[in-house]
Image: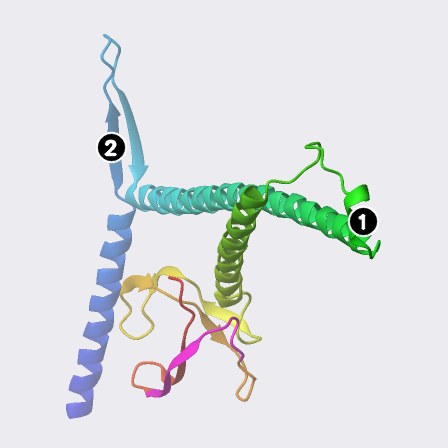
């Protein structure tokens, strides 16, 4: 008797689930009317679109907007970096000019000192202003050049750290079982935002860090199992 009641209850639950599914499908295909009313005396335009199609269009439009926005940000960062590199290149050219001037002075001093006697040095020394070097100005340029080289080194070091801390590729060979973005939660069946990607692979497959970073956690996580979390820094 109890088995018969359980079987009847199971069938009623199945019928109820199928009924809910049918109602849900009907709802997502219910057309939504969009009306365009022009300011001129022109007949309004009515467009009927099923809710599912409208939702899909919105998702694609939002995804496209995010993609275009990211491309715009990357382009702006590229041109900003290019401008900085052009500025630093100009500074390095000034450094090169200063070094050449120092080498010319060194060469002249070596030529004079090779004469060995004071009389010959004084006789051969060029006292004209043409091609002379302002020592104070040269000292200032050397100091400025050293500071600029330090700034360039710090900038390049920061860019190098960012480059090596930016993850590239996948940490393990396998199949992407769940991508980044909106998805159906495999545990509760609810649609929610997935902030990472899931990769399915065979047990024992090596897992590697895709960029430099610091291990912030290593151990068992209730929702993720065995877990190694790496902080790459730089946002």
34 sits left or right of 197 in the view: left
The colour scheme of the drawn protein is rainbow
Residue for point 50% across, 69% down = 176
Residue 118: horizontal and vertical position, in percent? Answer: 78, 52
Question: Picture coordinates of residue 85 (x, y %)?
Answer: 56, 46
Residue 214, magenta (yes or no): yes
Camera sees residue 85: no
Q: What number is the disc on residue 185?
A: none
Q: Count numbered badges in the picture.
A: 2
Could you tell whether 16 is left or right of 196 in the image?
A: left
Residue at left offset 80%, top offset 49%: 119
At numbered mark 1, what does the secondary structure look like: helix, strand or loop? helix
Q: Which residue is mark 1?
A: 119
The answer to which image quadrant residue 91 occupies is: top right
Q: Quadrant of the C terminus?
A: bottom left
Q: Position of residue 66 (x, y in %)?
A: 39, 46
Mark 1 or mark 2: name the one nearer the start of the chain.
2
Q: Nearer the viewer, residue 76 or 115?
A: 115
Mark 2 lies on a secondary structure that is: strand
Q: Residue furthest front?
A: 119
Q: Note whether residue 126 is visible.
A: yes
| Residue 50 lies in quadrant | top left
- 93 magenta-colored: no
Residue drawn 50% across the image and 73% down it: 212
Q: CA distance from mark 1 to mark 2?
A: 104 Å
Q: Relative to the observer, which residue lies in front, 95 or 77? A: 95
Q: Quick check: 182 left or right of 79?
A: left
Query: Range of the magenta residues?
Result: 208-220
Q: Which mark is residue 33?
A: 2
Residue 173 sits above or below residue 194 on the image? below
């Amino acid at each position: 008797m109890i088995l018969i009641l359980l079987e009847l209850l199971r069938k009623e639950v199945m019928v109820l689930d199928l009924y809910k599914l049918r109602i849900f499908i009907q709802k997502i295909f219910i057309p939504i009317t969009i009306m365009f009313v022009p300011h001129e005396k022109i007949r309004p335009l009515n467009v009927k679109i099923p809710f599912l199609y409208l939702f899909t269009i919105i998702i694609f439009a939002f995804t496209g907007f995010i993609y275009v926005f990211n491309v715009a940000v990357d382009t702006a960062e590229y041109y900003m970096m290019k401008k900085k590199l052009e500025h630093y290149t100009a500074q390095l050219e000034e450094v090169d000019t200063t070094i050449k001037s120092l080498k010319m002075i060194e060469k002249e001093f070596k030529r004079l000192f090779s004469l060995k006697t004071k009389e010959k040095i004084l006789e051969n020394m060029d006292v004209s202003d043409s091609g002379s070097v302002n020592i104070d100005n040269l000292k200032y340029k050397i100091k400025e050049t050293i500071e600029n080289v330090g700034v360039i080194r710090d900038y390049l070091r920061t860019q190098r750290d960012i480059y090596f801390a930016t993850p590239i590729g996948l940490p393990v060979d396998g199949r992407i079982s769940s991508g980044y973005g909106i998805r159906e939660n495999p545990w509760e069946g609810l649609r929610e935002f997935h902030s990472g990607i899931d990769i399915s692979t065979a047990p024992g497959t090596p897992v590697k860090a895709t960029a430099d970073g610091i291990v912030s956690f290593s151990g068992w996580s209730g929702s993720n199992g065995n877990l190694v979390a790496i902080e790459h820094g730089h946002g």
